[in-house]
Amino acid sequence: MPPRPRRALLAVLLTVLAVLGSALAPAAVAAGRGPVLPRLQSLYVPMPDGVRLAVDVWLPAGTRAGDRLPTVLETERYWRSRDHSGGIENDPRYGSATAWNEHGYALVLADLRGTGASFGTLRGELAADLIADSGALADWIAARPWSNGRIGTTGVSYGGDTAMLALGLRNPHITAAIPLSYDFDPYEDLVRPGGLLIEPRLAPYAQLLRILDAAGGTTCDTDEETRALCAEAGLTGASPKPVDGPDGPALLAAARAEHDANVNLVDQGRAGVHRDWTDGAQSWTAGSVGDHAAAISAGGVPVLTEAGWLDAGTANGVLSQFAGLTNTQDDWIGPWSHGRLHLADPFLPSRPLTGDERRELAERSYAFFDRYVKHPGRPDGTRRLHYYTFNEGTWRTTTRWPVPGTRTRRLHLGPGGTLAARPSPTPATDLLSADPATVPGTGALDRWNTNLTGDPVSYPDRAAADRALLGYTGEPVTRDTRITGLGRVTLDVTGLSGTADGALHAYLEHVAPDGRSTYLTEGQLALTDRAVASTGPDWRRLRTPRSYAAPVATPFPRDTPQRLTIDLLPTSVLLRPGDRIRLTLAPANPSSFETRPATGTPAYLIAHGGISASYLDLPVVG
């Protein structure tokens, strides 16, 4: 059985948003002359197609008729709030709502169609109709008598996805966006990186969604697995909050009945092997910011984004956003787990972020919305990227990527597990073959786990795992060397057996003088998706041009050498004198990925030396 999530995203997001309440000094609301408006209202808002969305409207205490407020809009996949008893202070969203309210904003929280207390059926995750609802909600907000007509969209994880995708609607009322820990391209950056399904991580997450939606009648009490999931997620006995009024509970029941036929993310992940897959409203492109890049850029809405280097592929997405969108941007890639809850620096112990660190993150968001939502700040097209460097603890800022001064350092795989500046003159091969079930994986708390659970990220010393894999280690560096960007691994590979539907995983590691091996980043590739295109969309300019489309997918041939390129996810790390770089190769990662082939033991020959050089390209700055 795959490892269970230690913390459900519903609980994680409530924790993240509650952090915002600790950073504010009260901000005065413009004095109106009418009666005081309710602090919180829960009601239904009809969409153009008649589907009613459950919405909570939080206004600053003391708001009067005639006041005009900027608004923060969040659309939630994991319930806008839970049912609760008692006063307003018992609402799980009270802390985050109070934070925005005290800063002078109205907060509107909506259950996405087909989820929570909203009506409708979810026909596809991040489907077009679901995203279009953000535009209708923005129009509804702008028409409220308390609205100043300016709206900022925000959210964490799935809510960040919808906040960013809403910009493609080019709604005139949406004037800024803060998508946090979001997935720029769900296919490549989360569900199928390198074309490989993260099935061990996806299965429990998808089951949690079924419980949240009561899809197919699934509840916490369905079986032992669901009971355990709910206990770990804090969902036992919980339900979405109904709207106000005596009919609220009955309306909630009617709405949830429409969720029975919601799509299942595991089914989409398994069926959507290729990026061009579609099935009705389900597709990978509908939820990809890259596929809406032209519309988002044309709208010119400024964006603040924050992601972690070790949070699935979200850092890759930030760089795609930075390179592929012309919008004014303030982008941050830091040492964070998913949701920015924990320090995720492989050279330091994992820990929750401190109160000061959380306040700094919160103040950044408030300042950004103050400029572009509370006030009519004019976007100037400036794009700034702030990034943290591992093993140094230093932040830097750039307006260009790759960072100016970047050069490619090529290290060739060689005999005796070496990495060298020049290829060996003598051709040779190394055998890579192991039972995928026994191959060391990346552990319970890796980058793919945190994105779907909110858990911290922690990689143990990989020296023992490296001895079970095929590894190549470079000479000690003689001076400070900073690697910043996306590396690539180019391999000359011959499949011997069981490789027609095989896969390769590559890990980049830092080796200290005492022998400790620290995980830095990784890449993977389904070998059927090895085809490289001549060009690609602009948002993929930093990645190897590859479509992952069905028409170009072919079985990996046997006994015929093939040239493969595996992209490594981006990183920034400092190597000090005496440190070394290690590249390890594996046929599987059972911690987080499906096994290819599904049965049997694949065998490959990795060639190096002579004209059949295999090599590692690293982006070195300075």
Image (cartoon, rainbow, N blue to C red):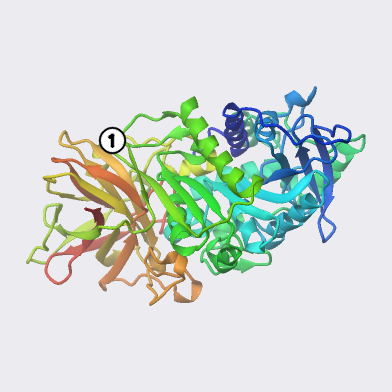
Image label count: 1
Tell me: residue 493, above or below residue 378: below
Near-viewer residue (318 or 500): 318
Tell me: residue 555, above or below residue 360: below
Residue 209 in percent (x, y) is at 65, 44
* Residue at the far top in the pictured view: 86
Judged left or right of residue 255, residue 158 is left
Task: Tell me the amino acid under the disc marked 1.
Answer: Asp
The residue depicted at 64 percent of the width and 36 percent of the height is 226
Query: Does the rendering let one see residue 255?
Result: yes
Q: Quadrant of residue 388?
A: top left
Residue 13 in percent (x, y) is at 60, 37
Residue at the spot of label 1: 461
Query: Does the rendering let one see residue 468?
Result: no
Circle 1 — which element?
Answer: loop
Judged left or right of residue 378, residue 460 is left
Judged left or right of residue 186, residue 576 is left
Near-viewer residue (391 or 452): 391
The residue depicted at 73 percent of the width and 56 percent of the height is 133
Q: Using a 10 Å C-alpha cutoff, classify the residue at mark 1 as few (fewer than 14 neighbours), some (14 to 19) or many (20 or more).
A: some
